[in-house]
Image (tube, rainbow, N blue to C red):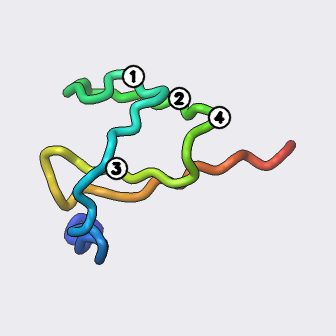
Amino acid sequence: SAWDRPLPQNAAAVTNYAAYTAGVTNAGSEAAVILWTIPADAPDQLYYQSESDPLFWGQIIVADLPAA
């Protein structure tokens, strides 16, 4: 299942990181809802990692909407 996926190959090498909290409401809390208003200068790629489950992680791709 998706929850049983292995960590990325370079995961063990990642030991120094900073939490990206720009635009996040309730960051670091145990609130049921965490809101993220993505800033215009957000990086193109971000990663998330659960603090309580090491297998709950993933990548977030931030992309501009196409012009209407």
How many numbered discs?
4
Give how far across and how far down residue 1 sits, in percent: 25, 72
- Element marked by disc 4: loop
Residue furthest out toward the right: 68
Disc 3: which residue: 48
Left or right: residue 24 versus residue 41 is left
Residue type at tag 4: Ala
Tell me how far mark 1 sits from mark 2, CA to CA.
8 Å
46 to 2, vertically: above or below: above
Disc 2: which residue: 37
Disc 1: which residue: 25
Residue type at tag 3: Tyr
Determine which of the numbered discs, if any, sits on residue 66 in the image.
none
Residue type at tag 2: Thr
Disc 4: which residue: 40
Marks 4 & 2, CB-CB < 8 Å contact:
no
Tell me how far mark 4 sits from mark 1, CA to CA.
16 Å
